[in-house]
Image (cartoon, helix red, strand yellow):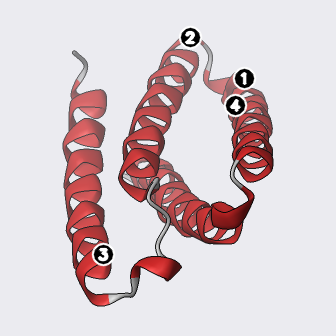
Amino acid sequence: MNQRLSVFTKQLLILATLTGLFITGAIFLIPPDYISPTLPFLLVFFTASTLLSFYFLEKKLKASASRFVTAFMANSMIRLMLYLAVIVVYALANRPDSVNFIISFFILYLIFTAFEVSFFLRKKVE
C-alpha cells in the first residue's frame, strides 16, 4: 500500500471514529424524533465512499498529474449524483424520516468532503 493512501486511511478512520463518538453522544442527548435511525449506516457509507474516491483519485494522480483536476471534477460529479440518488430514494421510501435523514446526510457530507479536500490541499503544498 502506498504511503499516502496509508496516511489518508488512518486519518479517515480517526475522523470516522470521532464522528461516530459524536453521533453516539447525540443519540443519547437528542430526542429520538430528531435523529435518523440511519445515521450509523450513513457514517459507514461516507467513510467507504471517501476511501474509494481517494483511492481512485490517487491512481489518477500517479498516472497523470495533468489530468488530476479533470478526474477530481468527474469523481465529484459522479459522487454528487450517487448521493442525490440515495437521498431521493430514501426520502421517497421513508417520508416520516426524510427531513432528519437529509439533515444528517448533509452534515456528514460536509464533514467528509472538507476532510478530503483539505487532505489533497495539505499534501499538495508539502
Q: What residue would you read off at disc 1? A: 67
- Amino acid residing under circle 2: Ala
Q: Secondary structure at mark 1?
A: helix
Residue 116 as seen in the image, left or right of residue 110: left
Which of pointers 2 and 3 indicates the residue nearer the eye? Answer: 3
Q: How many marks?
A: 4
Residue designated by label 3: 27
**Mark pair 2, 3: CA separation:** 44 Å
Residues at marks 2 and 1 touching, judged by CB atoms closer than 8 Å? yes
- Look at the numbered discs 4 and 3 and tell me whether their residues touch, using CB distance below 8 Å: no
Amino acid on which the number 3 mark rests in the picture: Ile
Q: What number is the disc on residue 63?
A: 2
Label 3: few (<14), some or many (≥20) within 10 Å?
A: some
Could you tell which of marks 1 and 3 lies nearer the N-terminus? 3
Of labels 1 and 3, the one closer to you: 3
Kind of residue sitting beneath label 1: Arg
Q: Position of residue 75 (x, y in %)?
A: 70, 31
Q: Which residue is mark 4?
A: 75
The reply to whether discs 2 and 4 touch (Cβ–Cβ < 8 Å) is no
Q: Residue at x 68, y 35 (%)?
A: 72
Residue 4: x, y in percent? Answer: 29, 32
Cα–Cα gap, marks 2 and 1: 9 Å
